[in-house]
């Protein structure tokens, strides 16, 4: 099958390349979700042959890099890279990503942070640099479109985030892992991954879709500058738990206010385009609304920490931390990305995949409700709800079940269901 790249050009095999990336991403997503379920099971039953911290590291790396990174980069290839002589290059990059991610998955389970797992992690970083080079070399500039800015800066922030990774071994050797700079380096990477690379990419995907529906986002020229400044200032929230200085809280407070302003300017314009969503079936609209809603909920949560006392609570109660990460990865990235790969036929639309998306949405909502609900109870010093660990485990099991349905359905030769 040949297709025309949505940005223009002649028939190309970029569709098959992008589908390969999405299929691989689903497999890593399934592996990450299984590890997540195992982590929940640890609190119910003893698993003597596994190390919890090793599973945690394998889960986080596979979810962040194996699912999130491959999903977003695969979409960028299809939506934003025109016909080019670089298809063989991107295939090599793909093979490198698979090797690095699979290596991390196995090595982290076996040894946690060790020589082998770190080596595969470093390999992944270098491959991400190769992808960024490919992106900037072969992308089709569309400077009149708002999504151009968000996509371009998403990749830039992904590159900038890796500076934190390179600082970790230096600080660890010279100052030790207990030094605040060590934790600041880790949080530097995570902050610009979640709030830069992933968040900007999600906004870009939504704007891109609306652009293709004939709606051009119009926002004041200073909006993006406000968003950029807010991203820099909200890094303060990531380091307050290791450096609880009052000045840092003030920087964060200013940052979250600027972020709320920027998102209001962006999404108040997007709201006007909501009639264009009516052409889709309910499950696809559910994916998109959950994705956008999760991104806005992230901003709302961050806006609440403008008060220093609430900021302290946000990182001392683990349920809130986990729930916030899942809001970004399972909510904003997965749901928006799921809508886009379904919309542009990068995953098969059939009964199994449709059921998979519905179960995934249910599992996501349930796990977030339980996480944040229990977090609020802990904040109020009311203890744990009855059978909390069994409840969260049961809700978590829905995720690998859903992803299994997506993976199997995507590989089955079933007649597609028309969803547009």
Image (cartoon, rainbow, N blue to C red):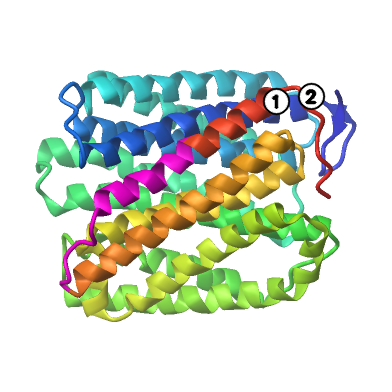
Label 1 CA crowd tier, 10 Å (few <14, some 14–19, many 20+): many
Image-based side of 313 in relation to 207, left or right: left
Point out residue 38 in the picture as x, y percentages from the top left corner. 31, 34
Image-based side of 196 in relation to 89, left or right: left
Query: From this viewpoint, which residue is outermost toward the front?
Result: 386
Marker count (numbered): 2
Contact between labelled residues 2 and 1, with CB atoms less than 8 Å apart? yes
Image-based side of 103 in relation to 409, left or right: left
User: Can see residue 229?
Assistant: no
Point out residue 300 in the picture as x, y percentages from the top left corner. 44, 73
Q: Which of the numbered marks, if any, corresponds to residue 215?
A: none
Point out residue 356 in the picture as x, y percentages from the top left corner. 60, 40
**What residue lies at 40% left-to-right and 64% top-to-bottom?**
232
**What residue lies at 86% left-to-right and 31% top-to-bottom?**
3
Image-based side of 238 in relation to 287, left or right: left
Q: Nearer the viewer, residue 241 or 227?
A: 241
Disc 2, SS: loop
Disc 1, SS: helix
**What residue lies at 49% left-to-right and 34% top-to-bottom?**
29
Q: Which of 279 and 69 is in front in this view?
A: 279
User: Can see residue 113?
Assistant: yes
Residue range (magenta): 381-400
Q: In which quarter of the image is residue 309?
A: bottom left
Residue on which disc 2 sits: 13
Quadrant for the N terminus in the image: top right
Which SS does the magenta portion mostly show?
helix
Residue 395 magenta: yes
Q: Which of 41 and 271 is in front in this view?
A: 41
**What residue lies at 77% left-to-right and 63% top-to-bottom?**
277
Residue on which disc 1 sits: 17
């Amino acid at each position: 099958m040949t297709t025309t790249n949505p940005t223009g050009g002649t028939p190309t095999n970029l569709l098959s390349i992008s589908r390969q990336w999405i299929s691989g991403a689903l497999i890593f997503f399934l592996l990450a979700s299984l590890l997540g379920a195992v982590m929940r099971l640890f609190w119910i039953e003893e698993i003597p042959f596994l190390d919890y911290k090793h599973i945690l590291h394998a889960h986080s790396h596979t979810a962040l890099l194996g699912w999130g990174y491959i999903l977003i980069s695969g979409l960028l290839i299809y939506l934003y890279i025109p016909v080019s002589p670089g298809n063989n290059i991107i295939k090599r990059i793909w093979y490198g990503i698979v090797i690095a991610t699979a290596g991390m998955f196995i090595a982290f389970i076996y040894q946690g942070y060790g020589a082998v797992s770190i080596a595969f992690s470093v390999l992944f970083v270098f491959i991400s640099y190769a992808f960024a080079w490919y992106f900037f070399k072969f992308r089709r500039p569309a400077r009149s479109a708002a999504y151009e800015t968000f996509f371009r800066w998403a990749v830039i922030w992904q590159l900038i985030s890796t500076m934190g990774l390179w600082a970790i071994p230096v600080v660890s050797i010279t100052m030790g892992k207990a030094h605040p700079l060590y934790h600041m380096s880790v949080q530097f990477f995570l902050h610009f991954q979640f709030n830069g690379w992933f968040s900007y990419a999600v906004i870009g995907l939504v704007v891109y879709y609306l652009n293709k529906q004939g709606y051009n986002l119009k926002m004041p020229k200073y909006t993006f500058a406000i968003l950029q400044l807010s991203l820099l200032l909200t890094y303060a929230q990531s380091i307050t738990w290791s450096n609880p200085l009052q000045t840092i809280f003030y920087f964060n407070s200013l940052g979250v206010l600027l972020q709320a302003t920027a998102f209001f300017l962006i999404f108040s314009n997007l709201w006007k385009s909501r009639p264009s969503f009516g052409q889709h079936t309910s499950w696809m609209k559910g994916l998109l609304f959950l994705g956008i809603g999760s991104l806005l909920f992230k901003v709302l949560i961050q806006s609440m920490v403008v008060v220093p006392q609430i900021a302290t609570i946000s990182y001392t109660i683990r349920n809130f931390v986990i729930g916030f990460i899942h809001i970004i990865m399972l909510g904003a990235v997965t749901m928006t990305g799921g809508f886009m790969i379904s919309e542009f036929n990068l995953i098969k639309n059939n009964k199994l995949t449709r059921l998979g998306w519905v179960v995934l949405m249910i599992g996501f909502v349930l796990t977030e409700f339980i996480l944040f609900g229990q977090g609020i109870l802990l904040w109020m010093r009311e203890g744990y709800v009855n059978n909390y660990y069994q409840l969260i485990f049961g809700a978590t099991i829905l995720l690998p079940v859903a992803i299994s349905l997506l993976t199997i359905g995507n590989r089955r030769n079933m007649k597609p269901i028309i969803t547009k």
